[in-house]
Image: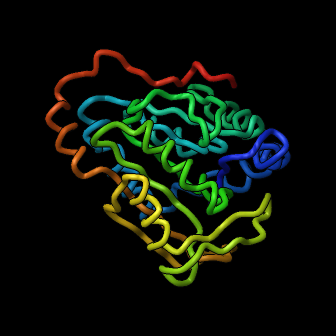
Amino acid sequence: MADVRAGGGAGGVGGAYDGVAELYATLFRGELGGREDELALIRRLVAAPAVAGRGLPVGDLGCGPGEATALLSGLGIRAFGLDLSAGMLAQARLAHSSGAFVRGTLAALPLADGSLGAILARYSLIHLTPHQLPAVLAELRRVLAPGGLLLTGFFATDTDSGDPLPFDHKVTTAHRWPVDTLAARFHDAGLTELARTTRAPGPNERFRQATLLLGDPAGEHTSAEAGQKRPEEDRMAAGEADG
């Protein structure tokens, strides 16, 4: 299961992934294609009114070597990948030369307010501390358009409630989250849980895996009504950030 990074500087989490980027890309190549539960939620993600109706792009935030970004683009929508690690972005561009990939951090996204129709944050929150998480969730909420959806995947604890637990991730320290606890953190940021999946660890996995699909239910109606009108200006900043 791919786990991507968010936060830290060139010598922190991003730098840690730079050192393993080529190995990581090799080990996890094709992994997403076997996750039918996640693929079903990704298809639901791109059907969000802000994407299917208004044509806003989907941001694969914490894209790693770009496999999910390429999958999203293959579904016929506009998508781009963003990552903190220059090494991971190099792997993404090597494997998916036609894709759009930019460098940035989830703590300060190079994107305008409400510019994304949907967000995929697949294992891109796991290296954040519980103290860092609220500010990043607020930033994700800021760039998500009314009617947009957000899908995140993460390592889950064995129970659905309680406190997050740090663990010795092979790249750098990460956290496992109780599903209810993480859903509550998203709710505090203004995003409501719409669906979830959980599964037991698979081969070569140590921990339970989970996903949350979230959105602003009130915003869905607003965006659906506006969906037949294209916004005056596409405000996505992809391609403007440095690589």
**Residue sitting at 73 percent across and 33 percent down?**
90
Does the rendering let one see residue 221? Answer: yes
User: Looking at the picture, how far across and down is residue 235, in whole percent?
Assistant: 42, 21
Q: Is residue 2 visible?
A: no
Q: Dividing the image into 4 quarters, which one contains the N terminus?
A: bottom right
Figure check: 195 above or below 205: above
The quadrant of the picture occupied by the C terminus is: top right
At x 16%, y 27%, the residue is 228
Q: Position of residue 157 (x, y in %)?
A: 58, 78
Q: Residue at x 69, y 39 (%)?
A: 84
How is the rendered protein coloured? rainbow
Considering only vertical position in the picture, is 86 above or below 200?
above
Q: Is residue 134 left or right of residue 2?
A: left
Which residue: 38% across, 20% down? 234
As drawn, is 24 to the left or to the right of 181? right
Image coords of residue 99 (percent x, y): 56, 29
From the viewer's side, name the closer residue of 99 and 80.
80
Residue farthest toward the top in the current orientation of the protein: 232
Q: Residue furthest bottom?
A: 159
Q: Camera-side residue: 129 or 43?
A: 129
Closer to the camera, 110 or 24? 110
